[in-house]
Image (spheres, rainbow, N blue to C red):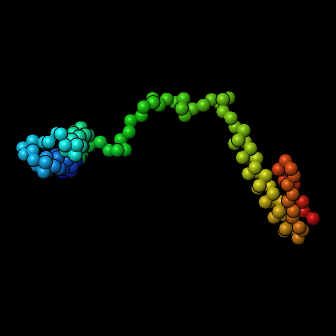
Amino acid sequence: MMKSPLPKHQKEFYDEAERLSKESGTPGDYDRDNPEVRKQLDKAEEAEKSHNSDSAAKMKSPLDVTATQAITSDMYYQPREEMDYSTMIAAAGDMGAKSARKQAKKDCVDSGKEYTETKDEEGKITTSCN
């Protein structure tokens, strides 16, 4: 099985901390007084915590999300008497009216007459065929 590259990433932090420690004159151990070394060691420890697995098959996907709320049928089902159909009815009425106006325009033009639409202040559309 393929080894995960993540532990190698953790090792890079330790190697960088070791290199910085040697530059500051602390051979064999990490110079924990140096803020840059401490920063690299903190990154390595954080990486170690998140890379508990050395197997790519055991690693969690970032898409692996667990629900924090229980899913119940109430979330998907709502009794008819509690549903608000007003917007759906209004949309259906608008679609029906558009279809009726389209057919009226076609009938008017087919008969050789002029089709007009007028809208009043309330938004009601009136059609005429002259």
Q: Is residue 18 visible?
A: no
Q: Is residue 76 visible?
A: yes
Dividing the picture into quadrants, the one containing residue 126 is bottom right
Tell me if residue 31 comes above or below residue 112 in the rendering.
above
The residue at the point 17 percent across, 46 percent down is: 17
Query: Outermost residue, right direction?
Result: 130
Query: Outermost residue, left direction?
Result: 28
Give the image location of residue 85, x and y in percent.
Answer: 69, 37
The residue at the point 42 percent across, 34 percent down is: 67
In the shown orientation, is residue 112 left or right of residue 32?
Answer: right
Query: Outermost residue, bottom direction?
Result: 112
Is 117 or 24 nearer to us in this picture?
24
Give the image location of residue 27, x and y in percent.
Answer: 7, 45
In the shown orientation, is residue 123 left or right of residue 92?
Answer: right
Give the image location of residue 82, x and y in percent.
Answer: 66, 29
Is 20 or 104 nearer to us in this picture?
20
Q: Quadrant of the C terminus?
A: bottom right
